[in-house]
Amino acid sequence: MNKIYKPSHRATGRAKPVPATWRQRRWASVLTMTRTGLVLGLLGVAATGMVARAAYLQLIHKDFLQGQGDERFLRVVEVPAHRGMIVDRNGEPLAVSSPVDSIWAEPGELLGQRDRWPPLATALGMSMADLEKKLAPDIEQQPSDKKPRRFVYLRRHLAPDEAQRVLQLDIPGVYAQREYRRYYPDAEVTSHLLGFTDVDDVGQEGLEKVFNDPLHGIPGQKRVIKDRLGRIVENIENLRPPQAGQKLTLSIDRRVQYHAYRALKEACIRHNANAGSAVIVDVQTGEILALVNQPAGNPNNRDELKSVLLRNHAVTDAYEPGSTMKPFAVAMALESGKWTPNSPVDARGPFRVGRHAVRDVHSYGLIDVTRVIIKSSNIGTSKIAMSLPAEQLWKFYKDLGFGALTGLGLVGERPGVLRHFKKWGGEIGHANHSFGYGLSVNMLQLAQAYTVLAADGVRRPLTLLKRAEPLDPAQEQRVMSAKTATQMRLMLEQATSQQGTGTKATVPGYRVAGKTGTSHKSIGGHYASNRYLSLFAGMVPVSDPRLVMVIIIDEPKGGVYFGGAVAAPVFGAAMGGVLRALNITPDDMPSMKLAGVDAPTEPQKP
């Protein structure tokens, strides 16, 4: 058996090992134990430090850390408030806010889903070009170091079912947000009066703008947790519930508004007019029951929100009222005691006033004051007015409300022009003011003045809000005696008879009083020879006046332009339906039988 050869220390050249002594072995053991203890001690200290730090963070420094976390993920967001409804005097809705959804996107995430853009664009109802345009700023930033936006609207105010179709595509980075959109059930019929709101539901025109603060409401607040992309992942708590806007109840009667609008629109179309306005006022309360204009647009269709279609001509335009002012010049004369309805007036023409001449369409000769109104004589009215000081006529006009705002607060209202009598330009200015030239009024001022005649001489403030309480007598102003007002109504009733100029304003079954007017338009400081305004102002029923209506048609064409032929028929057409809708008792049954209309049963007093 072979032996294993082990070289000696001499053969390897190494020193011969010296056996360790017991002291060396002891020190090696101590050193090892020391090292182990040191390591274990250090590990223990580290563990104790970590435990202490954890306890400190969890127990002592917890609020700070929680706050830091909240700053990164906990947010307080706004909860939109429901805009208040606008309703008519009977509670019928005129403007309502409906819940809708707006689609928004986180561009940084959506940019990575370009292959899914075509179905997204289709669901949103837009072209690919439109979608790319909305994301263009973020697309252009991609090669740079700038971060894309975190929020961009893709489409506002989609119906909930349309928004759901978008969300069902499940495209990363596309989300929905609940909002409200304004709807107007009567569309163009109330467009000029109500105005409209913008995409954020803030009033921009009309009553929506005037009463925006109470209608807008107070948004709520809630605390939520959002992820790094800004998406709400959890609702934590409601901090403040949203407070819906206040309901606004108007004096407008939806039925009356419709009848007035339909009659005005038909007249404007028939005579190819530039524009038209009409207003109906409750004589007893001063409440405006209807206010309509032409042309009109549909505020539900934002493509039609053009200024020309939404202009409220009833307050933004001031006109020379022409012959509709004659009853007030005559009423002033009756108030003076110098004249009566039977006083004679020499209406032969022309009537020379300095180097000017006042003319009538026909020469009426010697007539009485009543016939001056019936025939609408410029000469007769001028002579009556000029028999009294110009200052007296000026003060009377001011008491009727001309030259001042109506106080309704409507956007863009013009007060018209009523110059001081010393600036009328002498006697010819005095004469012109008596038959409606040299001054300008808006339609609501004219309606308020005729309401004075219908209300036995008392001027009541107009309102577009339903009066919850009877009008305070302190708010009323007596402008003329009840006797004068009654005399004027009887004269104006004859002006709508077969002898007068307003025969087309008649309503079967009712006694109607009113006055026509036709005036040349002033263009660039000069009167246009072939451009006219056609007007009619009237009241019904004469026995107990309840309603006043004023109509203005701007530039009727086709050769027919007199107020009796253009504006008066609007009164007759509208009031026929209005009086039935309001159950106002007829006061002229013979005329109803003559017109072949069946007498109605006794209506209830509204």
Image (spheres, helix red, strand yellow):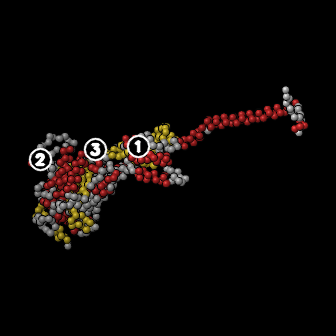
Q: Position of residue 247 (x, y in %)?
A: 34, 43
Task: Residue 268: give x, y in percent of width and height.
Answer: 22, 56
Q: Is residue 579 left or right of residue 165?
A: left
Mark 3–mark 1 distance (CA, rounded to whole Å): 41 Å
Q: Which residue is mark 2?
A: 592
Question: Tags 3 and 2 in contact by the CB under 8 Å rule?
Answer: no
- The answer to whether one can see residue 406 in this image is no
CB-based contact (under 8 Å), mark 2 and mark 1? no
Question: Residue 425: x percent and y percent?
Answer: 25, 69
Residue at label 1? Answer: 166
Tell me the distance, in whole angstroms, between the alpha carbons under discs 2 and 1. 61 Å
Query: What is the three-letter code of the residue carrying label 2?
Result: Met
Depth check, mark 3 against mark 1: the one in front is: 1
* Count of marks, rendered view: 3
Residue highlighted by disc 3: 89
Residue at the (28%, 47%) spot, across then down: 186
For residue 62, say whether it is visible. Answer: yes
Q: Residues within 10 Å of mark 3 (few under 14, many from 20)?
A: some
Identify the mark nearer the N-term, 2 or 1: 1
